[in-house]
Image (cartoon, grey):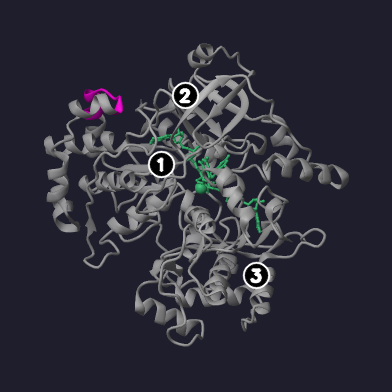
Amino acid sequence: MGFGSAKGSNEEAYLFQKLVRTGFKTNNVDHCTRLCHASSVAALLEGIGSGAVSNPVMDVTQAEVIIVIGANPTVNHPVAATWMKNAAKNGTKLVIMDPRKSDLTRLAHSHLQFTADTDVAMLNAMMHVIVEEGLVDQSFVEARTIGFDELKKNLEDYSPEKMAPICGVPADVLRETARLYATSRASMILWGMGVSQHVHGTDNARCLIALSLLTGQIGRPGTGLHPLRGQNNVQGASDAGLIPMMYPDYQKVVEPAARAKFEKAWKLAPGTLDDKPGLTVVEVMHAIGDGKVKGMYIMGENPAMSDPDANHAREMLAKLDHLVVQDIFLTETACLADVVLPASAFPEKTGTFTNTDRLVQMARQAIDPPGDAKQDLWIIQEIARRIGLDWDYKHVSEVFDEMRHTMPSISGMTWDRLEREHAVTYPCTNEGDPGQSVVFVNDFPRESGRARFVPADVIPAAEKPDAEFPMILITGRQLEHWHTGSMTRRATVLDAIEPDPVALVHPLDLAGLGVKPGELLTIESRRGKVSLYGRADESSPRGAVFVPFCYYEAAINRVTNDALDPVAKIPELKYCAVRVTAGGVAPQQVSFGGGQAMENSLASMNANL
Ligand SMILES: Nc1nc2c(c(=O)[nH]1)N[C@H]1C(S)=C(S)[C@@H](COP(=O)(O)OP(=O)(O)OC[C@H]3O[C@@H](n4cnc5c(=O)[nH]c(N)nc54)[C@H](O)[C@@H]3O)O[C@H]1N2
Ligand SMILES: Nc1nc2c(c(=O)[nH]1)N[C@H]1C(S)=C(S)[C@@H](COP(=O)(O)OP(=O)(O)OC[C@H]3O[C@@H](n4cnc5c(=O)[nH]c(N)nc54)[C@H](O)[C@@H]3O)O[C@H]1N2
Ligand SMILES: [Mo]
């Protein structure tokens, strides 16, 4: 199996999946999108026919109402947050829906601090109001959608009065918010991991899509759906086919026509390509346990830290016959590898990257890779050659050119134009097309041209609190650190600002545990435990602890649950049951210096693993 990277370029992602599909002869290729927006993409492809955003983030400045749900943009999308702040200052009504309080709530019209894990109850209640009070955009629903009757029937059971005790938001607030969203001139919804990382993540996203279709709040400037993308190139890596069930541009591996198309494009004999969808990121850890996967090639991902139930994931990575890790640092995953290939960071190579707005941007090499490090594209190509593939790309532009001939959404985009204009938005089908920043204006890219309502019912988290594990664990991010910390923990300034592993706990819960701010506490689930420092945090709801996953010395994914959403196979990183107790073993830190210090660090890191 191969894990590609959403930190690398489009061309690297494309060649990586081509290597796995044509060299390893399997569709076992995936990347961090599985842990990220897989559920949003599944729901969007099903309902609307396209997994990307309908409008750019900047469109919030043209909206009358903005809903931000399950995202913390001032921390995780600071540039996007700036547009939201500007919009709020200019009178746009900002509605935050989140179990935790974020900085942005200070500028918000309202904050629905609903109970974690109850998005479907809350959103169905809002849609119930829209139907009941005649706020449905009838002409939009009739002309541009299918499945309304089914949705309407399903919503009957979800009155705000009935849902209020479940989601913790008073019925009149649900009613008011529904009216506000439905009746504004332009409403936009932006969402993040709080929506997607649940066993019902696809259902959560289905509700957001239905809300926008029901009210016709899509297909115009300032109104639409925007799943805020995470990694710098996760949009591009997904588009380029780092997905086990899809070739580039979401063409399905199970469809004979798609297979034939790629066999032709890649000069393969008919019938060569694997016709079965491959394994996903979390599934592979179980497949290793079953002896079905024996080797892995991981480029620019750190699953020993980012995968749920990391104790199990690490055991499985260690069990592989052969593990190759290609990274810019010696990560926790690299510590488990047989071979480590030192690669290049983005300023050390040329390639294109696609941002959350569907904007394909040219990134040019500014410096040389250090020491023996090589450019990722070169490494991938050398591996391909050494396993007998007949590849001869002389320049990254040749890879891009091959991509655009297999990917309809960028088929009109040329390397020369990207060189000239630096960035072009897709869809860009014919050469010279301006590129569309707002899509779905006249129709949806589904067979009928219509979008589809998909009703959802309330499904609880896979693991609810009980007497033994009475609190819930929410994991996420901090401004100063990036994911597994492999880069930012080595950035001295950032690490000086947030140097120690912390758990954010409501002050009353902290007092109840007998822990003073800054003292040690231990978080334990059925799968593992970590000790770290308690921080009093009024933004957390009672009964929940929030922990960022960037600290190797208190790797919180040892505690999280790897239960999957059945449709998207995304794990429930935002919810599991834990027991929190005072005290514990102080986290052991290592130094990231070079030479002997690095040797010692590795030894101690290995001991930690
Ligand atoms: N500084 C920094 N920025 C980053 C990253 C980073 O590591 N560091 N990572 C990038 C990546 S890849 C991503 S995907 C994005 C993620 O960006 P976000 O999605 O903003 O990040 P998270 O912190 O994971 O969680 C978002 C919110 O989900 C809420 N939440 C928890 N449970 C629930 C629930 O049941 N329902 C709802 N609706 N909300 C809930 C949390 O309270 C939190 O506010 O950030 C990107 N930007
Ligand atoms: N508990 C918990 N776990 C989570 C999440 C959560 O909210 N809670 N969020 C999930 C989400 S949304 C995501 S996206 C994943 C992220 O999971 P990962 O992708 O595993 O995390 P990163 O730390 O971003 O790892 C990227 C690696 O790429 C390397 N790198 C950077 N640039 C390059 C390059 O150009 N070339 C190469 N070869 N390597 C490079 C970095 O050094 C780093 O080791 O984590 C998931 N895990
Ligand atoms: Mo992500």
Q: Most extreme residue toward the right, as rendered?
A: 596
The main secondary structure of the magenta stretch is helix
Query: Crowding near pointer 1: few (<14 within 10 Å), some, many (20+)?
Result: many
Q: Secondary structure at mark 1?
A: helix
Amino acid type, residue under disc 1 in the picture: Thr
Q: Residue 214: percent from the left, percent from the top? A: 20, 46
Give, as a single range, the part of the protein colored magenta: 167-176
Q: Residue furthest bottom?
A: 269
The residue labelled by disc 1 is: 61
> Is residue 59 inside the magenta stretch?
no
Q: Is residue 25 above or below residue 460?
A: below
Measured along the vertical axis of the image, is residue 111 above or below residue 422? above
Query: Which label lies toward us, 1 or 3?
Result: 3
Q: Is residue 374 visible?
A: yes
Q: Judging from the image, what secondary structure is the residue with disc 2 in?
A: loop
Secondary structure category for the residue under label 3: helix
For the residues marked 3 and 2, what is the alpha-carbon distance in whole angstroms? 44 Å
Q: Return the residue at label 2.
A: 540
* Disc nearer the start of the sequence (1/3): 1
Mark carried by residue 380: 3
N-terminal-most mark, 3 or 2: 3
Tag 2: residue type? Ser
- Are the residues tagged 2 and 1 within 8 Å (C-beta)? no
Closer to the camera, 20 or 493? Answer: 20
Is the residue 274 above or below the residue 61 in the image? Answer: below
How far apart marks 1 and 3 lie (CA) works out to: 42 Å
